[in-house]
Amino acid sequence: MLEIQRLRNEPEKIVEGLKKRFFDAEPIVDSILKKDKEWRIAIGELQEIAAEMNRMSKEIGGLFKSGKKEEANQLKEKTQELKKKESELKEKVNQLQKEIDELMYQLPNVPHDLVKAGKDESDNEVVEEGGVKRIFDFDPLPHWDLASKHNLIDFELGVKITGAGFPVYKGKGAKLQRALINFFLEEAEKAGYEEHIPPHVVNEASGYGTGQLPDKEGQMYYIPEDNLYLIPTAEVPLTNIFRDVILPKKDFSIKICGYTPCFRREAGSYGKDVRGLNRLHQFDKVEIVRIEHPDNTEKALDEMISHVRGLLEKLGLQYRILRLCGGDTGFTSAMTYDFEVYSAAQKKWLEVSSVSRFDTFQSTRLKLRFKGEDKKTRYCHTLNGSALALPRIVAALLENYQTETGIEIPEVLHRYLSFKEI
């Protein structure tokens, strides 16, 4: 969530910035500031009571020592009244803090200056295009037909076992999936990311820490008996490693990665865009996460974009990079770049990665801080990105590398497989 100090210092700037999302923040901001003023007054009164009780305690001790028992007991009665008032004020402070937090959770992150105003994906900016454009002298098949023809993925079996959106990878399809995971993880290691294998379920605090709750609660699979959630992305457990952490030095740059399955309800998804591997309820992904000093955020974002670009270039896929407009940028993100690959048979672009900077939005929830040179604690910046999500990468590889007799395997994957062609 946004920092309360930032709201106090520049409420107009925040309201104006959130207009890029077509989000009217003014009523919420006004309500927060009103309650924050009450909270600060109550805190001031508590401090005064504490100081008065401390003074009276010393005075009572002195009276008892002087043998003035009656005066001491009279003063003790006054302290009981102060204790009652202190208790009432603490309750008021806690209630106001709860109300402030609930309002703060409703405010999305303020878009970065480079992010333009816009309502949806039609307003996103294409900032780069690259990779290899495939030319076919035959009509290319969509990946679901190729997967069936070559016995790589069984969509119907997944429906039988679980339901739509849970495919079964088989034979060379399963091996290709595993090869891509290994390739992505090894490339991440070369780039300095430390691999983790985190839990695939998280508690409520972790969901709030990275902003999935309460914003995306309806998109997450929930286990009510244990009050746990299946992870929608490895971002959640990986970033929460640093919840309630104060890094001891200002010189830090933490780079971690992890492969996990991801689970998303994808409520409301339907039609041709969900066919095959286009949109699944369970899919595999390698995620990269960075914890950075605020001065290093821009450099870190550029490095992450370069890393994902490098993966797509090594796979020989045609790609483009988009900077999302305010209305299409995720609730927690200050700026997001989406990577899309071209689907030769479907004749459309498929999103395969999002690389985002969150600045202090997640770290305020996580209470993730560092100590500066002045020994004061400040909030870290967090970033993350898909590197990469598997389903649409597999779809693009099958479609773009197909021949009239089979499917070629990109050279970069040969060392992970016992075959070079399907």
Image (spheres, helix red, strand yellow):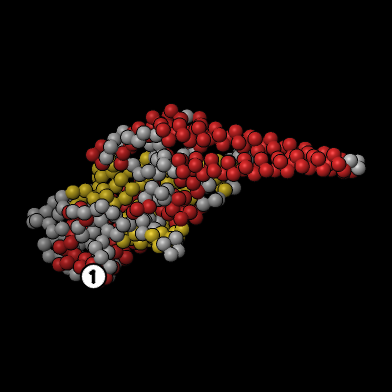
Disc 1 is placed on an element classified as helix
Work out whether residue 218 or residue 120 is closer to the camera in this orientation and state it.
218
Please tell me which residue lies in front, 4 or 404: 4
Viewer-nearest residue: 115 or 393: 115
- Which residue is at the far left? 138
Q: Residues within 10 Å of mark 1 (few under 14, many from 20)?
A: few
Which of the 4 quarters of the picture holds residue 170?
bottom left
Measured from the top left, where is residue 36 in percent x and y?
Answer: 53, 35
Residue 232 to residue 381: above or below: below
In the displayed structure image, the side of residue 61 where residue 389 appears, left or right: left
- Regarding residue 352, the answer to whether it shows in the image is yes
> Which of the 4 image quarters holds residue 376?
top right
Q: Is 126 left or right of 71, judged from the image as shown?
A: left
- Closer-to-camera residue (38/182): 38
Q: Residue at x 73, y 43 (%)?
A: 80
Residue 416: x and y, percent? 31, 66
List x then y, in percent, for residue 313.
28, 51
Picture coordinates of residue 358, whole percent (x, y): 42, 43
In the rendered image, the quadrant that contains the C terminus is: bottom left
Residue 283: quadrant of the picture: bottom left
Q: Is residue 62 visible?
A: no
Q: Residue at horizontal 36%, vertical 33%?
A: 24
Count numbered badges in the picture. 1
**Residue type for callout 1:** Lys
Side of 330 where 60 appears, left or right: right
Q: Residue at x 15, y 58 (%)?
A: 142
Mark 1 — residue? Answer: 160
